Amino acid sequence: MVDYDVIIAGAGSAGCVTAYTLAKRGKSVLLIDRKDHDTIGLKTCGDALGSHHLKTLDELIQLPSVPRDVIEHDVTGIDLIAPDMEHRLRMTGPSTTGYSFNRHKFGQWLLGLAEEAGAEVMASTHVKKLLLTEGKVSGVRVRPSDGDADKDITAYIVVDATGATGMLRRQLPETTPIERVIRKEDQMVAWRDVYETPEYTFETPEILEIYWNQEQTLGGYTWVFPQGHHRVNVGLGYMMLPGHRPPKDVFDSFIRTTWDFMKTKLNVLDSSGGIAPVRRPIDTMVDDNFMLVGDAACQVNPVHGGGIGSSMLGGALAGITASDALEAGDTSINSLWPYNPRYMDAYGIKQASLDIFRWFLLNVTNDDIDFAFKKGIIKGADLLHVSITGKMDIGMGDKFKRLVAGIGRVPLLRRVNKVAHLMEDIKAVYAEYPSSPEGLKDWQKRLVPIYEAAKKA
């Protein structure tokens, strides 16, 4: 007899939503986190979430509305700023409407929902080891932070929601079809501070700002997300490429000396760093008795590194699938497999397409970006369309006008055209995601030439 139907390691956004979804369906759930109960939710984050994610979760699992005391400010748009800091594009639309919020309160709210639904929470506890029985996952070994003895806890299904480290994923047997280790080039390092700015007023707190600068934040960006007129979340993130500088050093040398509000009186509310995966979702997020959600499953937007909404979506879909498997009395990889195509269809296809776009952005220079903004070769509507659909689509009339404007950057325009085709190629492959584990290897082979071409685009 097992101790629980499901054990979830990690009480972040994905873990809490997975627990909430399963507990609402009457399953016995243990949610474990190394933090103490009252600090769950504290995390390095941009503290912003699109309202379209919440609408989807309401339709899918009837997730309640976010309480107003969690929200710092309503968001209506995003400004993308060129490296010269003179040219900007405003993005407004369904995917840019949302909230800037208090990350700690948001995490505590999700935790409370899981508990109210019936999930048991074991806080201040380290998950030390993945337990295997006859080569298959059967539970976890834990140790409370105030204890001196390990304890083995069993379950029909174990969910790894341990974040970017994927601590349990890394302990899977070598025979697993799951990728156990994520390459550094597919991860982003970040640093961010949250301040009160009593001497500085943010005039448009409803607009979030994202700054591109390939010399300072290669493959990433700086964000300035106001949380009202006198509060701000400011940070940066960039690719973990060979020789990258520590993000705190870049924050101190670049952000502190460049932004005017950083030169005024600041009351520090939080300061921390972290890492996040920025790539397509892991090719399979399930094995026998085992599932991945959130950062551990690479459920993060590859272009901007935002992962709260997509991780919550992953948690909901994992919870639904796990519940179905438990009711069928079969938690094998075959029974858990539907989670993969469900997520790929809901978000993974777009995520994979944006992963191709990420490699294109990685090879664009500051001069290229400044030129494209200045000449109108890139428009806010273009980038908004890409962010919503994962597709680069410019009408023929517009295409000719921009070609004329882009004389002098013909190689850049050719690359834009090439990456647009590669994005469509990867979407076509993901649209044919295998319906069973037997088709995984052949499907993965189809990805290889597309990614090889993208890295050279």
Image (cartoon, rainbow, N blue to C red):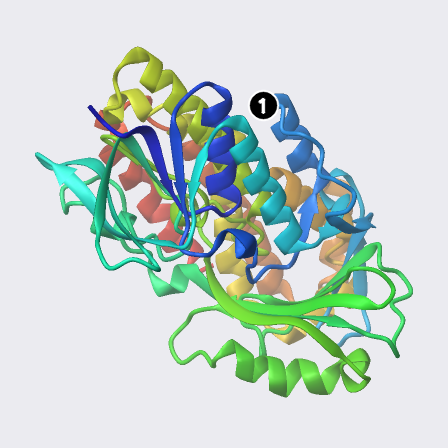
Residue 302 in view (yes/no): yes
Q: Residue at x 80, y 64 (%)?
A: 88
**Residue furthest top in the image:** 328
Residue at image mark 1: 60
- Count how many numbered circles sit on residues in the image: 1
Q: Is mark 1 on a helix, strand or loop?
A: helix
**How far across and down, in percent of the image, does residue 271 sit?**
60, 73
Q: Quadrant of the N terminus?
A: top left
Q: Which of 116 and 341 is in front in this view?
A: 116
**How far across and down, in percent of the image, does residue 104 sit?**
62, 55
**How far across and down, in percent of the image, does residue 144 sit?**
33, 54
Vertical order, 7 against 278 (above or below): above
Vertical order, 335 against 343 (above or below): above
Three-letter amino acid code at disc 1? Leu
Which picture quadrant has residue 50? top right
Q: Nearer the viewer, residue 145 or 313?
A: 145
**Residue furthest left in the image:** 134
Q: Residue at x 65, y 26 (%)?
A: 58
- Would you call the spot at circle 1 few (<14 residues within 10 Å), some (14-19), or many (20 or more)? some
Q: Nearer the viewer, residue 181 or 155?
A: 155
**How far across and down, in percent of the image, does residue 187 sit?**
43, 61
Residue 424 in view (yes/no): no
Judge from the rendering whether residue 164 lies leftward or rightward of residue 375; answer left or right: left
